[in-house]
Image (cartoon, helix red, strand yellow):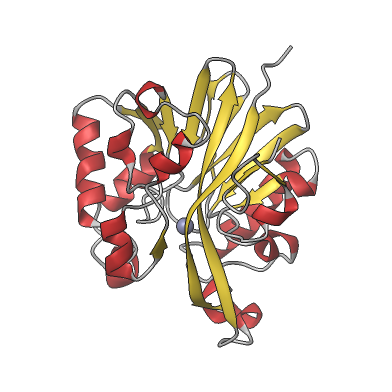
């Protein structure tokens, strides 16, 4: 029997003053100026005696600089679900944009699961070009490169089972080395999309997000996620406020954390 896990989405901040047009590519970007909110989440994959974390959000300092609303450190938000941040064995990082890798230092005993081509990209020749550079923090990239030298990165080329029932998959589209996670749960296979689908509408309406490196690959990623998830409602987008209403709230953490499976 495959090991099954519980899965939670935990909100730590938001961007209430975004615009619809920023979040969709091409014709789906209309109406450009319509207000649209993004939420910021980290995800918890829990099995008896083991908490695995997917993504590490960003810090209060980064939030202030980028004018995002920051409720608390992602690791603090996870502590409210009983996560001992020092005991987390793996933190899976979807990609290196600032809103996914900021609070890694909190996980003092973890190895960080990254796609080799994501690190290659951000230490490579295109990283300084404005449309890429604006999406990352220098300190984040330097810290991750340092973890590489310390042997704390678990490099993946494509697909890999991190622990039984928890699998990462490289997907194209948003960044060079974006990865998603599929998790075996009692409800079936859950797909944590992170930025492979920022919003439900990206994957449900086949409408690509506005920030991309490879449009055909982004469409292929939508197909891959539909194939992996046991049902469409088990594809969990990375930034959609509706995640907090489509799933059941965690007791005492209404509006902050939901149990997906
Ligand atoms: Zn993001």
The residue depicted at 61 percent of the width and 67 percent of the height is 208
Position of the C terminus, as image quadrant, is top right
The residue nearer to you, when weighing 79 against 180, is 79
The residue depicted at 23 percent of the width and 64 percent of the height is 128
The residue nearer to you, when weighing 137 against 176, is 137
**Relative side of 131 to 81, left or right:** left
**Relative side of 110 to 179, left or right:** left
Q: Where is residue 124 in the image (x, y as percent from the top left)?
A: 25, 52
Q: Going by the picture, which residue comes out furthest to the top?
A: 1
Question: In the rendered view, would you say 171 is above or below 81?
Answer: below
Residue 249 lies in quadrant:
top right
Position of the N terminus, as image quadrant, is top right
Q: Can residue 18 be seen in this view?
A: yes
The residue depicted at 65 percent of the width and 78 percent of the height is 28
Question: In the rendered view, would you say 129 is above or below 221?
Answer: below
The residue depicted at 49 percent of the width and 77 percent of the height is 17
Q: Is residue 54 visible?
A: no
Q: Where is residue 59 in the image (x, y as percent from the top left)?
A: 31, 52
């Amino acid at each position: 029997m495959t090991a099954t896990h519980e899965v939670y989405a935990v909100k730590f901040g938001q961007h209430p003053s975004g615009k619809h047009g920023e979040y969709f590519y091409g014709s789906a970007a209309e109406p450009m100026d319509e207000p649209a909110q993004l939420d910021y989440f980290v995800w918890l994959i829990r099995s008896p005696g083991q908490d695995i974390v997917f993504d590490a959000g960003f810090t209060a300092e980064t939030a202030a600089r980028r004018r995002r609303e920051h409720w608390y450190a992602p690791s603090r938000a996870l502590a409210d679900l009983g996560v001992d941040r020092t005991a987390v064995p793996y933190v899976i990082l979807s990609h290196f944009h600032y809103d996914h890798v900021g609070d890694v230092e909190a996980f003092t005993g973890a190895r960080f699961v990254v796609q080799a081509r994501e690190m290659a990209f951000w230490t490579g020749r295109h990283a300084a070009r404005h449309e890429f550079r604006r999406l990352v923090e220098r300190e984040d990239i330097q810290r991750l490169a340092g973890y590489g030298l310390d042997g704390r990165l678990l490099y993946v080329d494509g697909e890999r089972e991190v622990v039984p029932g928890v699998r990462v998959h490289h997907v194209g589209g948003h960044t060079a080395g974006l990865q998603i996670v599929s998790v075996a749960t009692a409800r079936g296979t859950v797909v944590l999309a992170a930025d492979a689908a920022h919003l439900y509408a990206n994957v449900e309406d086949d409408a690509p997000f506005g920030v991309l490196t490879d449009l055909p690959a982004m469409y292929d990623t939508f197909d891959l996620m539909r194939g992996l998830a046991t049902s469409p409602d088990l594809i969990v987008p990375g930034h959609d406020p509706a995640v907090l209403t489509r799933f059941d709230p965690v007791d005492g953490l209404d509006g902050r954390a939901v149990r997906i499976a």
